[in-house]
Image (cartoon, rainbow, N blue to C red):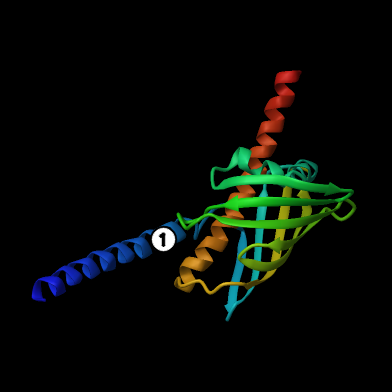
Amino acid sequence: MKALLAVIGVVLAVVGLYLGYRFWELQQMAAKYANAKEVAAESIEKDGPNWTVHFESVLAQPLDKVWRALHQPERSHEFIEAFKKSELKKEDGNKKTVEFDVQVLTLPVQTFVAELTFDDASHQMSLKTLSGPQDQTATYQLRALDPNKTLLVYDAKATDRLSVPLPLAIQQGAVRELFVLQIRAIQKSIAAEEAKSKAAA
């Protein structure tokens, strides 16, 4: 019996060490994005299962190029490894339905389907999740700061469908990383289009 208890104690200690390491690893990953240059301003608030999120990013690209890149969310997987899949499921006029598989902070891959609506006149993209770990609505609003600089403002409200047993700081880090990755995908999409244009010239 003592031997069994000793084995159980060792197993619990190993599990405890592993979980402790995983939390430390997630905290380190979350801290990595705390001062990301892609974030000019932010607010990430959580009340129970409800989130209110605001981000601002300044991109050193003209508004029209940023808007064209934002119009192609189904290409996200081409530019950012964390987007395991970004598949266009349906396109109807100014609406797209896209399925995403995304992994942030080394957490398990999250799958969600989103309906995206594009308003060309106001340079605003609206997002509504149709399935996934959250009920979310969001807007991506673009504004030209000068001919070669664009402000992207992201506002979202979300409700968790499932309880997430992680410290709030880590959950906030995951939200921040996902935004940063989207900005990087936009930038890489623009760079790819510019390279393609130069090659064709």
> How far across and how far down the image is residue 187, in percent?
65, 42
Identity of the residue drawn at 18% across and 72% down: 9
Q: Is residue 9 above or below residue 143?
A: below
User: How many callouts does the rendering have?
Assistant: 1
> How far across and how far down the image is residue 58, in percent?
67, 52
Q: Which residue is mark 1?
A: 26
Q: Residues within 10 Å of mark 1 (few under 14, many from 20)?
A: many
Q: Which of the two residues, 112 or 198, is positioned nearer the viewer here?
A: 112
Identity of the residue drawn at 58% across and 43% down: 80
Query: Is the N terminus in the top left, top right, bottom left or bottom right quadrant?
Result: bottom left
* Residue 38 in sight in this render: no
Relative horizontal placement of residue 179, taking residue 23 as reference (left or right): right
Q: Is residue 12 above or below residue 63?
A: below
Query: Is the C terminus in the top left, top right, bottom left or bottom right quadrant?
Result: top right
> How far across and how far down the image is residue 27, in percent?
40, 63
Which three-letter amino acid code belongs to the residue tagged 1?
Leu
- Among the 4 quarters of the image, the one containing residue 178: bottom right
Q: Which of the two residues, 101 or 63, is positioned nearer the viewer here?
A: 101
Q: Is residue 167 above or below residue 184?
A: below
Relative horizontal placement of residue 33, taking residue 132 as reference (left or right): left
Relative horizontal placement of residue 148, taking residue 35 as reference (left or right): right
Identity of the residue drawn at 77% across and 52% down: 97
Identity of the residue drawn at 72% across and 50% down: 98
Q: Which of the two residues, 64 or 51, is positioned nearer the viewer here?
A: 51
- Among the 4 quarters of the image, the one containing residue 113: bottom right
Q: Secondary structure at mark 1?
A: helix
* Residue 98 in sight in this render: yes
